[in-house]
Image (tube, coloured by chain):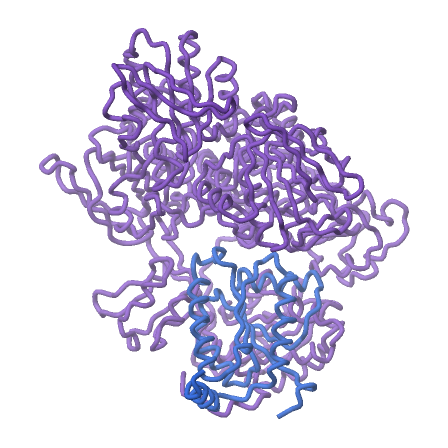
Amino acid sequence: MAAKENFEPKILAFLCNWCSYAAADLAGSSRMQYPPQIRVIRVPCSGRIDPFLLIRAFNSGADGVLVSGCHPGDCHYLDGNYYARRRFLMLKELMQYAGIPEERVNFTWCSASEGKRFAAIVDRVVARIKEVGPWEGFDGRGFARREEEMAGGK
Amino acid sequence: MAKPVMVIGGGIAGIQAAFDLGEMGIPVYLVENSPSLGGRMAQLDKTFPTNDCSTCILAPKISDCYNHEMVTTYTYTDVLDIQGKEGDFQIKLRKNPRYIIEDACTGCAECIEKCPVKVLDEYNVGLVKRKGIYKYYDQGVPNVVTIDPEHCLKINKDRCGICEKVCDKRAIDYNQKPEEMELSVAAVIYAAGYEAFQGEMVSEYGYLRHPNVITSLEYERYLSASGPTEGHIQRISDGEEAKKIAFLHCAGSRDVRTDCNYCSAVCCMYSIKQALVTREHSDEIEAIDLYYMDIRAYGKGFERYYNTAEATKGVNFRRNRVARVEEDPDTGQIIVKGLDEEGRFSEEKYDLVVLGVGLKPNTQVTEMMKKLKIRVNKYGFAATDELDPLATSCKGIFTCGVAAGPKDIPESVIEASGAAAQAAIIARQYPEAPKKKEDKEEVTYRFVDNERVRVGVFVCHCGNNIGGVVDVPRVTEQSKDLPFVEHSEEIKYLCSPDNLELIGDRIKEHNLNRVVIASCTPRTHETLFRQSVAWGGLNPYLMVMTNIRDQNSWVHREEKEKATQKALDLIKGAVAKAKKTRALERSRVDKLNKGFVIGGGVAGMTAALQLADIGFPVVLVEREDELGGNANNLLFTPEGRLAKRVVDDLKERVMKNDLIEAYTGYSVSKVDGYVGNFKLVLDPETSGKGEQKEIEGGVVVVATGAGELKTDEYLSGTSERVISQLDLEQKIRDKNLPGEMKKLFMIQCVGSREEPREYCSRLCCNQAVSNAVYLKERYPELDITILYRDIRTYGYYEDNYRKARQLGVKFVRFDVEDKPKVEEKSGKITISFRDPVAGVSREEEADLLVLSKAVVSRENSDILSKQLKVPLNEDGFFLEAHVKLMPVDFATDGVYLCGLAHGPKNLTESISQARAAAGRAAVVLTREYLLTEAMVAQIDSHLCMSCRNCIEVCPYQAIEISEWTGKAEVNKILCKGCGSCTSVCRPHAADLHGFSNQELVEEMEAIFADREPAPLKGEGL
C-alpha cells in the first residue's frame, strides 16, 4: 500500500446536468481553484444514479465517489433528487455495514450559482479521501469486523 | 409562415413570451437593452415560496429561448421608435457597439482578467467592481464580453489596448459603431420590466447616509453565492458579521409621499424569503425582525411560507410603524425607532437594516409608451383594462410582467404566455413567405450500426485557456493510442465556424462513426458540436463531449501535469462512452388539433375563445346547465363593472363561435391517451338528459373553478342577518338590503388562513373593500366596520383601501387566537371583539354581518386529477408543474391549468391565466406533429418483471404497463429523460438513451483503467 503522504487519490463524481454540473462550470468561469483529483461524469439527474454504478466505480478502482444533485425542491425533473437522497442514505449504511469507511461515499447538493460551494466540496472530499487512504477493495474484512463488534456487545 | 412579433425586454416575462411564440412557429425578435438576457430574475438568489435557486431555474429557460430557431435575439439594443399599426409595425432599433465581434468571441474571459480598468458592477448593484471589459454576469447569454465605452482606456485615451493583445481570436474591435436597423412586425409585446425603488427616495430611512442601511436588491446579492460576500451575512461597510438584521417593509410603497401609493405586491414575500434564507445561511444570527403594516402573503403557497417564517426561531414579525432610523456612530449599528400597534414607542439596534423597496415603472419605458400614445396609468405603468388585462390602449401592442404593474414572477410568466397567445392571433393573420429559403430537407445520416467503431478525437486549445495549462499536443498524441481511435487532432479554437466545418470534413475523410470533443462545457456547446457532426453525415448523437476547460484547465491552473493527466483520463472516458453510444432519433408522433376545455366559467370560456381565435376547434365541457360559473353570482368585477354584462357577453361569444362546441350539463367520465391524442368520454350530469359523447383531441385545459366555503361559523346559516360577500352583492343587485340599516360589520378570513385551510383566499379583501366603498358612496350614513387580520389589497387595489378609509370605513384588526364572537339577541347581531389600537374590548350591535368566506377547491377535483394524472396540492387545488416558471402547465404534457382551479384569484387574473393556458395549449396544437426527445428511457420487455417500480418514480406519468405484453413501456412523447426509472429497475430493464448503463460503466472503467481493479470483482452487467 502506498504511503498516505504520497497518495494521489482518484475520485469519481457524478454531477447532475442542471445544478451541480452548472456549479462546477461556474467555479471554472470564476477561476476558483480546487484539487485535480476529481473526475466528473455528467448525468441528467442525481435520480439517474443507480447505486450499482457507485459499486462499479469502486470495483474499477475509485478511491471515493461524490454524487451531487440539485438542492431539495430544485430538481429539474421535479423530485429525482429526493429519490437519490434516500437511495444514498441506504447505500451509505450498506457500505458501513460492509466495513467501507463512509468517507468514501459522498452525497451533496449544489445549485447552479454555487461555484464556490462546489470548489469547497471538492476540497473537502479530496481531503477526506486522502485521510482514509487508497481503496482496498471489497475484501469482506468489514463484515468480519462488524461481526466482531456485534459479538463484543457494541 | 406568420409575420414576426417583437418582444421588448429580455427578462423572465420577455423570455417566456418569445419562447412561446417561437414554439407556435411564429418568428420573434427579442430585444434587450442590457448585454445579457435574464433581467431582474438573474440578480435574485432564491425565489419564494419554494426557495428555488433563481439561476438554476432561469438558465435553462434562457438557453431554450436564445437557441430557439424562431427567436432572433438582439441584446445591448435599444428601441428607438415604433410606427405603424396592428399587423404592420415598423420598429427602429439601435444595436449599441460592444466593441467585440460577437461571432468571434468565445467568452473565454482572458481579456477580463488582464483588463486594468475597474468600475462599479451594475449586476451586483454597484456593490463590487467589475472590469472595463466584462460579462454582465457569469452565466449571461450570449456568452460574449462587452467593452464599457465610458471607461475603456483605449476608446477614451487611446492607451492600453491590452484586451486586443491577449485576444488571439481577434474579437476586439475598438472602432465598432452603433448600428441602426428597422424591422417590420405584426405585433409587439412590451415586457420591459421595472426599476427597483431607489433607496434615496425614502430619505427618512437613511439610505446612503448610513452605510449599513441597504436595499433589498443589494441584500439579494449579499445572499447570493456569486455575490460580493459570497453568501456570507456580513456588512460590506466594515466586514463585520451581521447578527441582528431588520427588514423594513413598504419602503416607498403604500406611501402618498412617494407617489407610489400602490402596494408593490412582492416585498412582503421577498422580505420573508430573505429572512428565511438568512437564517439558513448562518446559525450565528441572533434576531431577524420584520417591521410591517400588513403581511400580504396572498399568492399560492405564500401563507404556508409565512407561517414557516413565523415559526422559525429568531425570525420576529413586528407590526410597527418605523418613525426614525439613526446610526450609532461608534459601532455603525442602526437604531430603528418606531411605534407599535398599541402606540408604544420602540427602539432597537441592528447591525444591518434592509429596506423592502418597491417596484417602480421604468421611466424610459413610460416615456416611450407616452410617445407611442399608449395609455399609461397615473403611476406610469402601462394602463390595461381589467377584462383585457394584457392589451395596451394601442391595438396590436400587448404588455406583460411588471411593465403593466407590480407583480411576482409566476404572474409575470402567466401574463407572458397570455400576451404571446394574443400576439399569435395577429401574427397568423399576416402570413409571410419564409425569409430563409431553408426548407428543412429530410436529413438522412449514414447508417453505422454494422460498422466497426471508428472514433475521431478533437482536442481544443481554446487559445490559451486550455492550452496554457494542459499539454494539448501530448494529450492529442496519447489519444491516438486509445482503443478504436482512428484520428486525433488538436485545434486552436474548435468552435470557430471553419473548424466546425473541419470536423465534418474529417468525419468523411477518415470515415469516422464516433466523435469525441474535448473542449468546454456541453451545457453551452453541445448543440453546436452536434450540428457539425451532422454536417459530416453522422447522426448528431454519435458525439460525446468532455469538459477539459471549465472543469479542468480553469480550476487547476497551477498543476499543469495533473491537469494534463486529468484531461487524458476524461478523454479516455469519453472515447469509451462513445464506443457504446448509439444513433438516436427524435421520432414523430401524430397529433389531433382539437382542444378540450373543462369548465365553462370565465376562465374556461376565455380559454376556449382564445384557442378558437388562434384557429383551433374547441370542445367546452360544463357540468352545470348554464355557462358562467361563479361569475353568475358576482355583482361587480374588480373595477366595479356589472359582472352580468361581462359574463353574458362571454357566453354569447362562445355560443356564436363556430369553432366551439359547448356541452353544458356534461362532465368528463373517462380520459384515455396522452398529449396530442386524448380521448374523453363525456356523460350527461343527469342521466337521460343527452347522450354519452366520445370525443378525441390533442390538449386539455382544466378550468373547473372553485367554490365558496360552507360553514356555520359566526352564525352563518343560522341567522339571516349573517350573509356572505356574494349574498351581499346579490342583495345589492336585487335591492333587497334590510331597510333601516345603520350598522354593518364585515369579518375577513372566514375559514381562510387557519387550519385546515392554511392559505389566503386572495380576493376577499379586495371584494370586501370594494363592497364597503360601494355602500359608503351610496349610503354615507351607514356605519361600516371591517374586522380583519391583515388587509391584503395588493397592487393597485391599495387605492381602493385608501378610499375606503377616507370614506370613513372602520378597520379593526383581530388575532386568529382571539376571533370576534357573534351572537344573536332579539333580532340583532352582537359582535364582541378586541380593538388592539385602543387596547379595549368592545361589543357592538349590527344590522348585518357580512362574512368573507374562504375560496375552497371543488369537492370532486380528485376524480379529474386521477383521470388526467395530474396532481392536487394539500388544499385540493390543482398543482402546476412548477409554481414559479410553469404556472399553467402540468408536469404531464398536453394538460394545462387556469382560473380558480389553480388557486384563489379574481376575474382579471383568471382571464390572464386562461389566455396563458390557451397559449401554451396552442403550442402543441400548432405543430404538424409532435417530436419525442432523443434521450429518452427505454424498457427491455424481455427483462422487465412488471414490478411497477419505474411507474412509481416516473415524475411525468410516462410509463405504463402495456396491455399486450404485460410489461412496462415508456411513452416516448411524455418521457423527459431524467433516468429515474433506470435506478429503480432491479433487472436493469430500464435504460436511458445517451446515459445508458453501458455508456456510464464504460466511461468510468476507462477513467480508472490505470488502476488495479478491486480484488473482489462483482458480477454485474
The residue located at (25%, 14%) in the rendering is B826
Which quadrant is the N terminus of chain A positioned in? bottom right
The residue located at (33%, 77%) in the rendering is B987
Compared to residue B269, the image places residue B975 above or below, namely: below
The residue located at (36%, 53%) in the rendering is B892
Whether residue B865 is visible: yes
**Residue B239, horizontal then vertical, whole percent:** 75, 51
- Chain A: drawing colour: blue
- Chain B: drawing colour: purple
Nearest the viewer among B360 and B569 is B360
Compared to residue B531, the image places residue B636 above or below, namely: above
Whether residue B512 is visible: no
**Residue A102, horizontal then vertical, whole percent:** 52, 77
Which quadrant is the C terminus of chain A positioned in? bottom left
B175 left or right, relative to A116 = right
**Residue B409, horizontal then vertical, whole percent:** 52, 41
Nearest the viewer among B752 and A145 is A145
User: Residue at the left extreme?
Assistant: B688
Nearest the viewer among B893 and B881 is B881
**Residue B363, horizontal then vertical, whole percent:** 66, 29
- Please identify the quarter of the rendering in which residue B832 is found: top left
Compared to residue B535, the image places residue B454 above or below, namely: below
